[in-house]
Every structure is written in structure tokens, then in C-alpha cells.
């Protein structure tokens, strides 16, 4: 096989591995590069990786004369990643001669190829004809195509210049009442981060609903309000797990409800963007023993493992702004002091022991709150928990130099929160403020 080095020396009979290595080493190509014919020849290689690297290097030449070759390669290429790179090479020419081909690319069946065609045509979006063609893709079936067209042509939102700020009346505020009623009084884009664990379906006295459907509707209504009051592009971390409702008699089976899976599609529909799922792994002795019966009889179909995990679903308020835009809203000193220290968790499995106390049966461990608050907010930010319970989110927020806003419907828990936050450990906490 003919091949070249970055200095243009040709060799015969190099292995695929050596050919690929040489292609990857080329780097920036001089305008007088002489081995263009070798790159064109390598587009006939049986190796998709070699074809990919060959077209990647051909694109660096920025040669309009290659346009017909690119069209031929695109028509015959079967591999998506290589076809995408060919479409990219066409767009990178930034040539009006390439416009007809890029228009054709918009009709391709591969969205990865279409996206490269869009990128190429955006160079000419001041042309009214091109603008109209691209705008017509607003209703394209692919969601990424829709997003790019909306950002480029239809994003009329006025973005706040006070992103790092939050309302004073909500800072270190604890309110007692129905979260839906309370949040109606909170203005749009007030909070930076929400971290919460909602009451489990009919598992506690304070969370009884007449049906699972009504429970999910309640959560969806609450989280829709949370979405409204969350600042542009900021995060909501939701801690849930499937819940088991015990059987009502020996002739009936228990029911297990997959809460995180059932609420997820509702979250996406209301405008949250899924980012990550984090598994909270607890020691097995902390879980209810479900496997004991199976351990005795070992009969197939009756296996039920001990449930030692909960899920932290990480969502971001869908935004056309990147994270870098948020960084620019903060003073450099805050960015610096908020940086995560060494020893942070690198995986999505967090091994943290659960916490309990005599007053609350489902207490957030402070260590869990510390991680979420430090990873998803800046110092001085406002952190919200709509189901405050024992107040772990508020304690962690103060500990980590954030402000908190807590709501809690249960009067007994609210009394305990007042006692806790009236201690000498906390200053300027607004207890039961009328928001």
C-alpha cells in the first residue's frame, strides 16, 4: 500500500497499524502538501479508521477542487462516523460552490451527517434563502437538529445578568406549609440548586395518597414549580428509589413501584435535561431483609434481593447557554473558593452510610448533602429542599457557605427544624417567614 510520512516520503507495504499511526501524526498540513493523491487513495481502504483519518486530513487542505471527490466518497461510504467526517470536510471548505451539496446533505437519513450540513450552511445564514432552508428544520424529527435551529434562529429569551444573585427574603428561610402553595409566591429564577428526597408513596404517615397516579401527579406539579423558580441552566438532584407496598393478605402479592423511572419522563417533559444518575450504595445490614425466605427454600421465581441502593437523578434546567456562560456570572474569587478539593468521588457509585434519628425515619446523611451541594453550586448560592424533613440540606448549606431555603408541610418536623436552627450554630435564620 502506498503511504507517506508527514514530510512527504512515500513507502510501500506498510501495515494498517503503521498507516493509521502515520495519518494520526500528520497534524497541520502545509498548503504545498504533495501527497494529496495518497490520501485520496486511502479513501479506498477496507479499514474504516484509515478512511476516517484520510478524510480528516484531506479536510485540512481546504481545497475546493476536492469537492467532487467528497461527493463521491459520501455517496458510497457506509459507515456513519466516516460519512459525518466527509460532510464536515465539505462544510469546512466554506465555499459557495459547496452549498448545493450541503443542501442535499440536509435530506440525509443520518442525523450526524445532517448536523454537519447545518454547520456548513450556517456560515451563509445571512443569505435569506439559506436562512429559510435552515429555519424549516425547526420541526425536524431529530431533537438535536431542533435544538441547534432553535438556538440559531428562535432563541429570543432575555438572559438575566444577575445570575449569581438570589432574593434576600428566601436566604436561610424555613417555611411551613404545602410546597405547591408556598412556591406560587416565589418569583421565577430565584434558586440555584434543588436537592431533595420526596416522601415515598404511602410509606410514611405524612405521605398518604389515594393512588400512585395522584402521587406522581403531586411530584410532577411540585417539580414543575421548582423548574420555574430555578435559574437558567442550574441543577436539580432528585433522590428516589423504588418503594414496596406490603401485601394486604396472604392471598395477595406485594407491589413495587419504580418511582425514579416513572417520574423521569415527566421531568423531561416539563423542561429538565437529564445529566447523570448516581447510585447511593448503603451497607447491606441497613436494608430490610427481603432475601431471608429465599435463603431457606431457594425456589426459582421467588428471589428478591436486599435493596441497598437509592438513585440520585441529576437534572439541569434545559438551556441554550453552556456552563461557561454561568461561570462568567460569578466573580473570579467565588469561582476559586468554590473549587472542589482533592479526594472527590470519581465514579457514579457513592458509598455512604445512611443516617437515622428518633424524630425522623428518613434522614439525609450530611456527607451526601455535602457532595451534592459542593459539586452542583457555588459559595453564596441558594440551595432549596422542598421536603426538608430533618433539615440536612440546610445544615450542609450553611456548613459549605451557601444559603438555604427549606419548606416542610409536617408541623412536628417544622417544630424540630425551628429548634435546630434556633441553636447557636446558626445566625440570621428566618423561621416560618411568611413568603
Image (cartoon, rainbow, N blue to C red):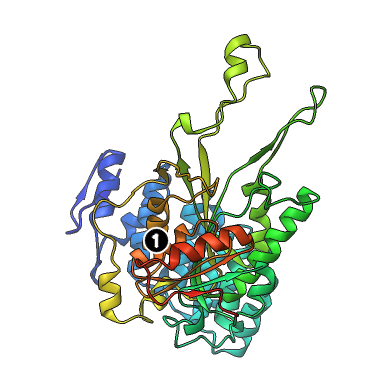
Residue furthest top in the image: 297
From where the camera sits, is residue 104 visible? no
Residue at the image point whose x is 56% and y is 30% from the top: 288
Q: Name the residue under label 1.
A: 396
- In this rendering, position of residue 146 left or right of residue 275: right
- Give the quarter of the image for residue 46: top left
In-front residue for pair 200/111: 200
Q: Where is residue 363 in the image (x, y as percent from the top left)?
A: 50, 49
- Give the quarter of the image for residue 14: top left
User: Is disc 1 placed on a helix, strand or loop?
Assistant: helix
Q: Where is residue 390 in the image (x, y as percent from the top left)?
A: 51, 56
From where the camera sits, is residue 306 visible? yes
- In this rendering, position of residue 244 left or right of residue 1: right
Mark 1 Cα shell of 10 Å, populated few (<14), some (14-19), many (≥20): many
Q: Where is residue 1 in the image (x, y as percent from the top left)?
A: 30, 43
- Give the quarter of the image for residue 373: bottom left
Residue at the image point whose x is 63% and y is 64% from the top: 223
In-front residue for pair 135/407: 407
Q: Where is residue 428 in the image (x, y as percent from the top left)?
A: 41, 77
Q: Quadrant of the C terminus?
A: bottom right
User: Is 158 located above or below residue 361 in the figure?
Assistant: below
- In this rendering, position of residue 115 left or right of residue 220: left
Amino acid at each position: 500500500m502506498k503511504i507517506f510520512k508527514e514530510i512527504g516520503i512515500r513507502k510501500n507495504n506498510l501495515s494498517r497499524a503503521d498507516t493509521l499511526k502515520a495519518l494520526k501524526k500528520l497534524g497541520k498540513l502545509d498548503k504545498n502538501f504533495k501527497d494529496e493523491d495518497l490520501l485520496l487513495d486511502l479513501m479506498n481502504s477496507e479499514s474504516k479508521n484509515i478512511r476516517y483519518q484520510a478524510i480528516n486530513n484531506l479536510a485540512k487542505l481546504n481545497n475546493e477542487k476536492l469537492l467532487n471527490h467528497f461527493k463521491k466518497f459520501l455517496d458510497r461510504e457506509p459507515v456513519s462516523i466516516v460519512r459525518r467526517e466527509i460532510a464536515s470536510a465539505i462544510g469546512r471548505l466554506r465555499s459557495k460552490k459547496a452549498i448545493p451539496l450541503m443542501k442535499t446533505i440536509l435530506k440525509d437519513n443520518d442525523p450526524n451527517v445532517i448536523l454537519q450540513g447545518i454547520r456548513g450552511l450556517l456560515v451563509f445564514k445571512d443569505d435569506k434563502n439559506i436562512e429559510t432552508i435552515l429555519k424549516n428544520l425547526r420541526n425536524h424529527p431529530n431533537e438535536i437538529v431542533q435544538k441547534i435551529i432553535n438556538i440559531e434562529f428562535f432563541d429570543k429569551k432575555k438572559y438575566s445578568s444577575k445570575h449569581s444573585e438570589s432574593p434576600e427574603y428566601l436566604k436561610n428561610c424555613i417555611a411551613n406549609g404545602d410546597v405547591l402553595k408556598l412556591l406560587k409566591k416565589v418569583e421565577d429564577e430565584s434558586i440555584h440548586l434543588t436537592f431533595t428526597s420526596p416522601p415515598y408513596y404511602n410509606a410514611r404517615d405524612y405521605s398518604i395518597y389515594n393512588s400512585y397516579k395522584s402521587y406522581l401527579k403531586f411530584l410532577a406539579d411540585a417539580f414543575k414549580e421548582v423548574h420555574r423558580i430555578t435559574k437558567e441552566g442550574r441543577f436539580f438532584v432528585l433522590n428516589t428509589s423504588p418503594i414496596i407496598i406490603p401485601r394486604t393478605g396472604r392471598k395477595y402479592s406485594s407491589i413495587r413501584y419504580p418511582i425514579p423511572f416513572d417520574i423521569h419522563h415527566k421531568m423531561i417533559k416539563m423542561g429538565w435535561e437529564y445529566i447523570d444518575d448516581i447510585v447511593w450504595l448503603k451497607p447491606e445490614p441497613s436494608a430490610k431483609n427481603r432475601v431471608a425466605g429465599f435463603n431457606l427454600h431457594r425456589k426459582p421465581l421467588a428471589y428478591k434481593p436486599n435493596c441497598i441502593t437509592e438513585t440520585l437523578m441529576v437534572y439541569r434546567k434545559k438551556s441554550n447557554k453552556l456552563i461557561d456562560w454561568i461561570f462568567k456570572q460569578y466573580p473570579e474569587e467565588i469561582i476559586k473558593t468554590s473549587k472542589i478539593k482533592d479526594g472527590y468521588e470519581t465514579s457514579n457509585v457513592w458509598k455512604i452510610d445512611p443516617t437515622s434519628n428518633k424524630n425522623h425515619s428518613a434522614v439525609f446523611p450530611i456527607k451526601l448533602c455535602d457532595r451534592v451541594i459542593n459539586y452542583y453550586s457555588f459559595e453564596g448560592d441558594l440551595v432549596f429542599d422542598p421536603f426538608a424533613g430533618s433539615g440536612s440540606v440546610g445544615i450542609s448549606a450553611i456548613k459549605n457557605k451557601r444559603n438555604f431555603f427549606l419548606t416542610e408541610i409536617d408541623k412536628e418536623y417544622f417544630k424540630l427544624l425551628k429548634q435546630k436552627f434556633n441553636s447557636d450554630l446558626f445566625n440570621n435564620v428566618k423561621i416560618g417567614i411568611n413568603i
